Image (spheres, rainbow, N blue to C red):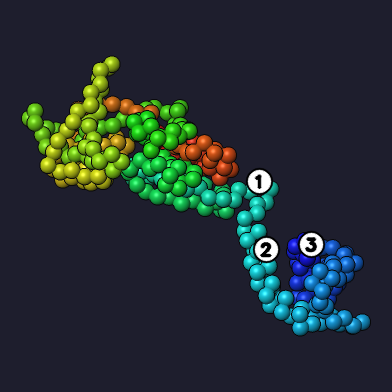
Amino acid sequence: MNAAPFPQLHVFLAVARHRSFSGAARELGVTRSAVSQSVPQLETQLRVPLFARTTRAVSLTDAGRRLVEGAGPAMSQALASLAEVSAQPGEAVGRVRLSVPHAALPFVITPVLPTFRARHPRVEVEVTVEDRLVDIVTEGYDVCAVRLSESIEREDGAGGHRPAPASWWSDRPRTSRAAVSRSAPRTLTHECITFRSATTGALYAWELERGRRNWRVPVRGLVVTGDTALPLALAEAGAGLAYVFEPTADARVRAGALQRVLEPYAPTVPGFFLYYPSGASRSAPLRLFIDAAKELSLRALRP
């Protein structure tokens, strides 16, 4: 065969389903003469008759039955796959893969994802929750990740692959970090709950600032964790000071379970950024997710 006879095969299977050239023409939205021309073309290419024709009926030959049994399921699967990935005008189809730290879930995922899925039901969203800074290129995050801005800058885009960052909240107040405790320290020394970076393995140095001065303090303590939620729980239980992303502690502070300490030295950061490989910016699902995040997560982060 000089060319793959897929169009003719599609017509043949329609005729076989209806046992009628006219029925196949109605299903395919073509003329009966087009169907009548297509089937002989396939028979010529295969060099076997596929239908036994009479004035009243069309029936499959043995070769026709074997072709239906062999090609029919594969053609149906191919057509279903084409329908699954195809989009209507204005409809988005595809996938957004996100790497998100625990601290970002209530501000980036929870307020955004339900509405985004309702607006774009054919976009699949895969969320991996991890606090380490991932290399979005070598680890297969073909779309994007969410991190605080200073983490991206410090790690140079993770693994040496400089990302293309997109700020979500450039028009809102900067977000603070805070040290919190069940009660205000009464001494100059106080037990601290320390955090070990899952990215570098190093203990996190507390960042403090006042006016134009800033410090990175290498804090030590008898409790070390790589989990972002545990320091808050331990601080609430009276185990020591915890240095956290302030919005995660706001509810406990309002309820009186925790107090802010060292508040005059609390630094501010621009907030969460989304970053992605340069080619991913052409992804329609990604652009739609960024738009939804700008609109919806802003509400969750405002007082």
Amino acid found under the numbered disc labelled 2:
Leu
Q: Nearer the viewer, mark 2 or mark 3?
A: 3
Q: Earlier in the sequence, mark 3 or mark 1?
A: 3
Residue at 52% over, 53% down: 124
User: In the image, which is nearer the foreground, mark 3 or mark 1?
Assistant: 3
Instruction: Answer with mark 2 or mark 3, whichever residue precedes in sequence.
Output: 3
Q: Dot 2: what SS?
A: helix
* Structural distance between the alpha carbons of marks 2 and 1: 21 Å
Nearest the viewer among 162 and 32 is: 162
* 3D distance between C-alphas at marks 3 and 1: 38 Å
- Is 246 left, or right, of 30 in this rendering? left
Q: Amino acid at mark 3?
A: Asn
Marks 2 and 1: CB-CB under 8 Å?
A: no
Residue position for label 3: 2
Q: Label 1 neighbourhood size at 10 Å, few (<14), some (14-19), many (20+)? A: few
Q: Which residue is mark 1?
A: 90
Residue 79 - label:
2
Q: Mark 2 or mark 1: which comes first in sequence? A: 2
Distance from disc 2 to disc 3, alpha carbons, whole Å, reads 24 Å
Question: How many numbered discs sit on the rendered protein?
Answer: 3
| Residue 121 versus residue 52 in the image, above or below | above
Q: Picture quarter containing residue 147?
A: top left
Task: State the image quarter where residue 224 is shown.
Answer: top left
Q: Residue at x 45, y 42 (%)?
A: 137
- State the residue at coordinates (17%, 33%): 219
Are circles 2 and 3 on residues that touch, CB within 8 Å?
Answer: no
Are the residues flagged by discs 3 and 1 in contact, CB closer than 8 Å?
Answer: no
The answer to whether residue 183 shows anywhere in this view is: no
* Residue 72 in sight from this viewpoint: yes
